[in-house]
Amino acid sequence: MKKVLSFILISTFFIGFLASCGGSGSSDNSDKTSSNYTPNLENGKAVYDRACVACHMQGVAGAAALTDKARWEESAAKGLDTLHTHALKGYQGKYGVMLEKGSCADCSETDVYDAVAYILKEAGVEAK
Ligand code: HEC
């Protein structure tokens, strides 16, 4: 069972990696946030632990802590597409600066979206 799981995880990473490489420059991926994207929360946690935890665990430098439901509700009200864009491209808000992909250079778009999904789930917030 464990083997199967890690195989799925590895394939997911690999596909994500291929997608991000193939997409460089040419595709605009504007479709990614639409209903055909299903978050992979397991990958989201892995990405979060690697790339987002430094700021979003305790809430460093103006970032919302994972447990700060009020802040995530405020964010979620902007809509999931906006959160995706802000996490992907970076964003200067009233609390601080969210860096492009949280400065995770080797994170794919899907990695970032999965991490956002994981964060919202952990915070107990839903974004439309
Ligand atoms: C260097 C610190 C830092 C890292 C690392 C970081 N963030 Fe952030 N993030 C911030 C700050 C600061 C804000 C708040 C900006 C504001 O609203 O003023 C923020 C806000 C956000 C928001 C809300 C945006 C909005 O419009 O309200 C999302 C979603 C988010 N981060 C996702 C992520 C994800 C996913 C990762 C990991 C891939 C990540 N962040 C890594 C600092 C960071």
Image (spheres, rainbow, N blue to C red):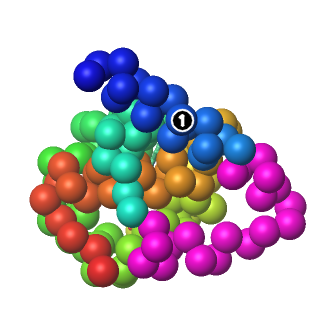
User: In the displayed structure, would residue 2 be above or below residue 73?
Assistant: above
Residue beneath the point at 32% across and 71% down: 75
The N terminus appears in which quarter of the rendering? top left
Q: Position of residue 46 (x, y in %)?
A: 39, 33
* Magenta stretch, main secondary structure class: loop
Instruction: Tell whether 1 sits left or right of 44.
Output: left
Q: Residue at x 70, y 50 (%)?
A: 20
Q: Is residue 91 left or right of residue 80?
A: right
- What type is the residue that disc 1 sits on? Ser
Is 111 magenta? The answer is no
Q: Is residue 58 above or below residue 101?
A: above
Q: Which residues are magenta?
A: 19-37
Pinpoint residue 69: horizontal percent, then vertical percent.
15, 60
Look at mark 1 in the image and give the residue it sits on.
11
Residue 119 image offset from top left, x and y in percent: 29, 51
Query: Would residue 1 be visible to someone looking at this image?
Result: yes
**Front residue of this view, candidates 64 and 77:** 77
Residue 93 in view of the camera? no
Vertical position of residue 7 compared to residue 59: above or below: above
Q: From the viewer's perspective, is 77 left or right of 43?
A: left
- The quadrant of the image that shows the C terminus is bottom left
